[in-house]
Image (spheres, rainbow, N blue to C red):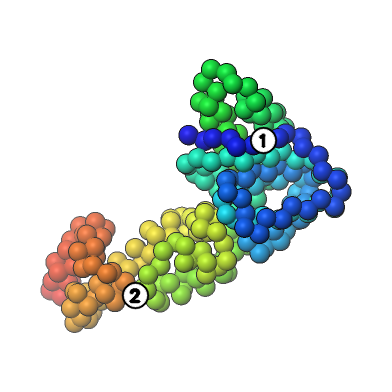
Amino acid sequence: MIEIKSIRHHWPEKAGFTLTRPQGHAHFTFLHFYNSVELTINQHTLITKPHACILFSPGTPQRFYSPQPLLHDWFHCQGNGLDSLLACDTVYHPASFGFITAMVQEIEAEFSDERYQRQVLLDSKIKELLIRIARASNGCTAMSDAANHEEVFRQLRAHVFTHLNEAWPVERMAEFVHLSPSRFFAIYRTLYGKSPTEDLISARIDAAKTALAFSQQTLTDMAETLGYRHFSHFMRQFHARTGETPAAYRKRHRNS
């Protein structure tokens, strides 16, 4: 369940206001800017359009600067599944935005009053807000953001696929392109239509198929070369994706 920690709607700041959190915040941070701001995300600085929204994940460095008087809605919260509703550390520019402040105001009013089933209603309203922002953005922001990173992701993918023997957790891949794991995951899925882990497994199984058909490498050595610490893990993943054991696949292709 999502729990609000603090929240304000239509919050004003003077021209020249800068917020800097090098270590990020302990909780998720939602921001909706009425005017354009200079926003830095993982060392990448951009000028947002009016009514841009972002959900920072915990611990992600935060910085924004407003050269003009600022109005914005914001809240801090914690809970599971937030990044499945709205990709974290990604700027959204919803085509319609009139509902945002109204909903944040409703959430703030509910948060400030100890009424029956308060927490259940807060959880529901926050989820609705994030889903409506994602819908209003219609995927355009995510695709635009992905396009800006396409070349560095291509380089990462090529490097990973030529070093399959190494361990590639999502955190390591994200660090390679200087992004938070949640933002990296969202961009990767947008670019390649699958998660980085699924893409890595597919690459390893494809490499195994080639080795089985054309090399004399033992199955144990092959699994190690492809980055599997345990042979049984290699066996399970190969069978799950091909319907055959590695030995049966090799035999069938050698006899064909």
Task: Say which of 232 and 22 sits in front.
Answer: 22
Residue 47: x %, y % from top left: 76, 56
Residue drawn at x 45%, y 61% as measured from the top left = 170
Relative to 113, say whether 126 is above or below. Answer: below
Residue drawn at x 24%, y 75% as measured from the top left = 222
Say which quarter of the image contains residue 8.
top right
- SS label for mark 1: strand
User: Would residue 55 be found to the left or right of residue 117 on screen?
Assistant: right
Residue 141: x %, y % from top left: 63, 50
Residue drawn at x 68%, y 40% as measured from the top left = 74
- Residue sitting farthest toward the bottom: 216
Q: Is residue 210 visible?
A: no
Query: Which mark is nearer the camera, 2 or 1?
Result: 1
Task: Say which of 17 and 210 sits in front.
Answer: 17
Local crowd size for mark 1, using a 10 Å CA cut-off: few (<14), some (14–19), many (≥20): many
**Looking at the picture, which amino acid does disc 1 mark?**
Ile
Q: Which mark is residue 38?
A: none
* Among numbered discs 2 and 1, the one appearing first in the sequence: 1
User: Would residue 39 be found to the left or right of residue 192 on screen?
Assistant: right
**Looking at the picture, which amino acid does disc 2 mark?**
Asn
**Number of disc labels:** 2
Q: Is residue 222 visible?
A: yes
Residue where numbered disc 1 is placed:
7
Residue 116: x %, y % from top left: 53, 17
Residue where numbered disc 2 is placed:
165
Residue 20: x %, y % from top left: 72, 55
Spatial distance from mark 2 to mark 1, Cα to Cα?
Answer: 47 Å
Residue drawn at x 39%, y 76% as measured from the top left = 163
- Residue sitting farthest toward the top: 116
